[in-house]
Image: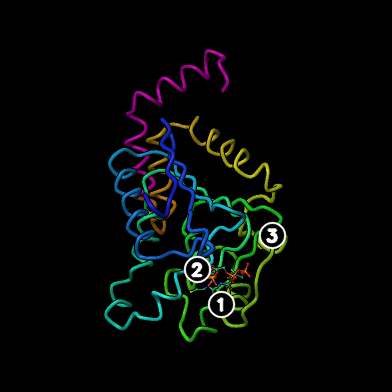
């Protein structure tokens, strides 16, 4: 892979965005490689950790490429389809954000299930300054994550959220020193990995599904019949707490 470093572990995949010459800006090659990662995770579900190399998460979509795109490319939803695919991955995803997460970089982080930040993290959507809108999820995901007031400050007034802002507004789960960011992200993934994989998967589907009592009941019906549930509950009742 030319724009990503990908580490495949038994229960997780760690993806590091790596285009140092462009502050990890998301270009067509990176979009293609992230789709390859998604295909692999859809085939064999594992947790996903996304981070950026060199003290930057990602400085947006590649502006050189954006400049050349027209209506047809916009309608292809090049970034929005990728981020939707990431959001719909079977198992939880975590973004570890150090430095700038701007434009499409911020939208990539918004598409993950949980975000952790270093004190240097900065989230922002400066797209209107480039004469376009943040069309890969920011207009609705940021609103869901941080509320309409914060989202409109970011989207309409160019407000950048530093790590403290992001924590206060609930956009990130935690702020940890840059040197501990990955360790903390792995600890979070370790905690997730201790849960039943099917239970995690169905919980994510139900939680993202808009909510309906029927889907809750159907998902629970599947889980109630699983061997994993019986093994875990037997272990609890036998006194083996995890
Ligand atoms: N697309 C393409 N190239 C980008 C880029 C992007 N989104 N963001 C940064 N780069 C390139 C710069 O053009 C520069 O290239 P050069 O060395 O050939 O001149 C290189 O990355 C380093 O960027 P630079 O601006 O010098 O770094 P900085 O540390 O001073 O600033 C940022 C970092 C992220 C604040 C700044 O690069 C920036 O504002 N980027 C654009 C953010 C943006 O508008 N994103 C939304 C896109 S939709």
Residue at 59%, 78% in the rendered image: 152
Residue at 41%, 56% in the rendered image: 211
Please give the residue where the numbered disc 2 appears in the rendered image.
60
The magenta segment? 215-242
Q: Is mark 1 within 8 Å of ligand 1?
A: yes
Establish if 64 lies above or below 169.
Answer: below
State the SS at label 3: helix
Give the Cα distance between marks 3 and 2.
18 Å
Question: In x, y percent, where is residue 91?
Answer: 41, 43
Q: Is mark 2 within 8 Å of ligand 1?
A: yes
Please give the residue where the numbered disc 3 appears in the rendered image.
163
Determine the quadrant in which ligand 1 lies: bottom right
What predominant SS class does the magenta segment belong to?
helix
Quarter of the figure with residue 68: bottom left
Is 71 situated left or right of 22 in this image?
left
Q: Is the residue under label 1 in contact with that under label 2 (CB below 8 Å)?
A: yes
Please give the residue where the numbered disc 1 appears in the rendered image.
126
Residue at 66%, 50% in the rendered image: 174
């Amino acid at each position: 892979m030319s724009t990503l470093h990908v580490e495949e572990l038994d229960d997780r995949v760690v993806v590091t965005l790596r285009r140092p010459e462009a502050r990890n800006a998301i270009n067509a090659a990176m979009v293609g490689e992230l789709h390859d990662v998604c295909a692999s995770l859809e085939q064999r579900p594992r947790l996903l950790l996304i981070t950026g190399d060199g003290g930057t998460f990602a400085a947006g979509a590649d502006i050189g490429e954006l400049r050349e795109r027209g209506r047809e490319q916009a309608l292809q939803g090049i970034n929005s389809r990728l981020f939707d695919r990431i959001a719909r991955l079977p198992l939880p995803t975590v973004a570890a954000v150090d430095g700038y997460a701007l434009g499409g970089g911020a939208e990539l982080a918004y598409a993950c299930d949980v975000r952790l930040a270093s004190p240097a993290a900065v989230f922002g959507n400066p797209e209107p300054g480039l004469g376009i809108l943040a069309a890969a999820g920011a207009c609705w995901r940021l609103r869901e994550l941080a509320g309409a007031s914060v989202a409109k400050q970011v989207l309409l007034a160019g407000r950048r959220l530093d790590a403290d802002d992001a924590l206060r507004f609930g956009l990130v789960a935690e702020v940890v020193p840059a040197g501990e960011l990955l360790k903390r992200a792995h600890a979070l993934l370790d905690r997730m990995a201790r849960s039943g994989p099917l239970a995690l998967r169905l919980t994510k589907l139900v939680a993202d599904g808009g909510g309906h009592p029927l889907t809750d009941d159907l998902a629970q019906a599947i889980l109630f019949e699983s061997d994993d549930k019986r093994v875990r509950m037997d272990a609890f009742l036998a006194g083996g707490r995890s």
